[in-house]
Image (spheres, rainbow, N blue to C red):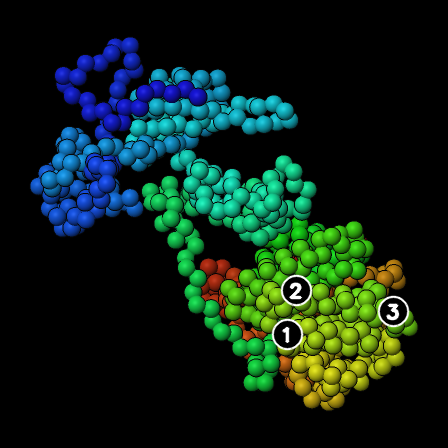
Amino acid sequence: MATKKRKCDLIQTDNTERDTDLPPIIQTWSRFLVMAMYLPEGTSNTLSKLSPFVLHKTFQGLCGELKSLKKLTNGSILIQCMNSKQSALLRSTKTFAGIKVSITPHEKLNSSKGVIRSPDLRYVEEQEIVDSIPSVTSAKRITITKGNKKVPTNTFILDFTQPTPPSTLTFGYTKLNVDPYVPNPLRCFQCQRYGHHKSNCRGQACCSNCGKKDHERENCSNDPYCINCKGLHPATDKNCPEWILEKKVQALRIQKNITSIEARKILRPPQQTSVIVPGLVQRLKAGESLIVAEGYVFEFERRGYLKAGAFVPEIVIEHPELVRSLHEEFVHAGSDVTLAFTYYGHREKLRAVGREDQLEALNVQALKIAKDVADRTGTLMAGNICNTIGYDKDNPDTFETTRDVFKEQVEWAVKYGADYIVAETFSDLGEALLALDVIQKYGNGLPAVVTMNSSASNISHDGVPIVDALKKLEDAGAAVVGLNCGRGPRTMMPLIRKIRKTCKGPIAAIPVPFRTCEETPTFQSLKDPETGKGVFPVDVSMFTCSRSQIAEFAKEAKEAGVQYVGLCCGNTSHCLRVLAEVYGHNPPGSKYSPDMTQHVVLGDNKLAKKRQPVKKTDVDTAILRKSKICSSMYS
C-alpha cells in the first residue's frame, strides 16, 4: 500500500518553508480536536468537574462560537471547529480555565476513506494516485482470490485528509465517483461478539465454529452454531443476520457521521413491552375464530427447497431465512398463528434421510424462528407434531417408540415458548390418542389441537369411524378436534357438518385447496383426466381451487360453526387472505385485495374511463382473440 505523511494537522502559512521534493501540501486544517488535561500522578480529572456553562463561556471568550462540543467517556472534550483560525488558536492553547491542557487533532475524525472503481485504473499504480492527488494520503488496490491466486481488481480504497471524502475525483480525462468506504463489522476473535477488539474483550474465549468454550476452531469437528444469532452456521459466516445488521450499522455510521452505538440504536431500537396475546382457549371461549396457515411442506417443494417424497423440512437448517419469510407472509395474509415448521421433523423422518444427528438443531431452530415471528406480529406460536412412520396398530412395541418421538418434540416446544401444540394428520385413532397423552403429560399444561386425516372410507386405519374418533379425542381432553389435509373443501365439509353435530367444543377444518369430489375424495386419489394417471404429488396443481371456491368453503365453514380454520398442503397467501376476509378478519394483506373498479378496461373508475374509454365490443373482441390464441396453443 502506498502512503505518504499525513498533513491534516498542518496549518500552511506564508512563511512556512516547503521541501520542493515533496508533493504539494493541501491547505487543510483539523476540524475535530480533543482537549484533555495533564494529570499529575494521584490527581483526579478536574476538567471533567468543570460546569458546562463555564466550558461554554471560556471557549466563547477564547475563540468565539464553536460548531459543537461533546464530552467523551474518558472526561476529555471533543471540539468541532467552525474554521481553520479557530483550530489553530485552540491548538496553541496550553491552559484552559486555569487548568493545564493539551488540545490535539482527533485521531480518526479528521480523515476519511473512499472507494473508486474504473477499468481505466487497471494499470495505475497505488503510488501514482498518492502522488497525483494532494488530499489522498494512501491508496490500496483491492485484490480477490480465484483458486489459489490473488487477482488485482480495478477498485482502490483511498485515505483522504478531510472528514468526508469528495464526491468525485478527476484523473486526466476521467472523472470518477467516490463512494463512501464501509468497513466490515469488527468481530472479536476471542468471544466472537461484534463491536470490540480482542485486546478489549472481557468475555470468555469460545470457538468461532460451534460457540463452545473448551477448544479453538482449528480442532473443532462439531456442527456449526453461531453464538450471535443462534443459527446453524459459524460466527464467521457473512450470511449471518447479525453480520448483515452490523454491516448496516457501519454503513449508517459513515452516512450520518455518527458513532456505531448511535447507529445501533437507530437500526435496533429498544424492544417494546410485549403485548399480552390472549391464548387459544381464551379466544375460542370468547367466540373468536382463528385463521391458521399450514401447508409449508408443499409450498417449499413448489419453490424448489424441499424434496417431494420424504417431505422432510431440511430447509429449516439450510435456509432458515426463507422459513422466517414464509411465516411473515402467511401472517400478512391473515394467519392468527405462527406454526413452527417441525412437521415431519421428527426422529424417524430425519433418520430416513440420514440427518438424525441434526434432530434437535432442526426443531430448536424452527421453534425459535416461529417464536420470534409470533412475538413481533402478535400471533400465537404453535408447536407441531404429526403422524410418524413407525406406529403400527398391530405391534404394541411401536407404541413406546412413537411416544418417545412425540415426547422430545413436545418438550422442545414447551422450552421454546409455544402457546399450544398441534398434533395432526393422524390416520389411526390410537396414534392420535398417544400424541394427546404425551402433550398432556409433558406439555406443561399447554392446550392441544388434534386433527385427523380421513380416508375415502371415513374410517380410521384402526377401524373407528372418523366422527366417533374425534369425539373420543375431545372426551380425552383435546381443546380442538377436527380434520386436516387429505380432503379438499368439497369432500371435507359434509364430514365437518357431522362432526359439528357430534362434538360439543371447538372444531377444526383445514382442507387441501384442491378440487376433490365424491369419486376422488382425497387429493392423493385425483387422476389426470387425459392420461388417467394419478397426479399426486407433482401434478396435483392442475386441480387447484380458485379463490372463489375457497371463499365458498370459508362461507360454509363459518355457517357450520368452525372456529379453527385454515388451509393445508397447497396453501397460498392469496387464498388464505380470502378465507380470512370471509371470516370477517382484516389482515394487512387486505390492503392489496382485488379492486376491479380501478381496471383500465373493465373498471367503472372515472379516472380509468377518462384515460381510455372502451366499448363493450372492444372487450368482446379482446376476449375472443385471447381464446383463439389459447386454443391454438393446446390444439
Residue shown at 57%/64% (left/top)?
A: 371
User: Where in the figure is residue 418, as x and y percent of width and height?
Assistant: 61, 69
User: Which residue type does callout 2 highlight?
Assistant: Trp
Would residue 625 appear left or right of 95 to someone viewing this image?
right
Closer to us: 390 or 633: 390
Would residue 6 appear left or right of 382 to someone viewing this image?
left
Residue shown at 77%/67% (left/top)?
A: 404
Q: Earlier in the sequence, mark 1 or mark 3?
A: 3
Q: How many marks can you see?
A: 3
Q: Secondary structure at mark 3?
A: helix
**Which mark is drawn over residue 108?**
none
The C terminus appears in which quarter of the rendering?
A: bottom right
Name the residue carrying label 2: 412
Is residue 537 positioned above or below 555 on the image?
Answer: above
Q: Residues within 10 Å of mark 3 (few under 14, many from 20)?
A: few
* Label 1 close to label 3 by CB (< 8 Å): no
Give the image quarter of residue 520.
bottom right
User: Which residue type does callout 1 highlight?
Assistant: Asn
Mark 1 and mark 2: Cα distance apart in space: 11 Å
Name the residue carrying label 1: 444
User: Where in the figure is residue 492, as x and y percent of width and height?
Assistant: 75, 77
Is residue 248 positioned above or below 576 on the image?
Answer: above
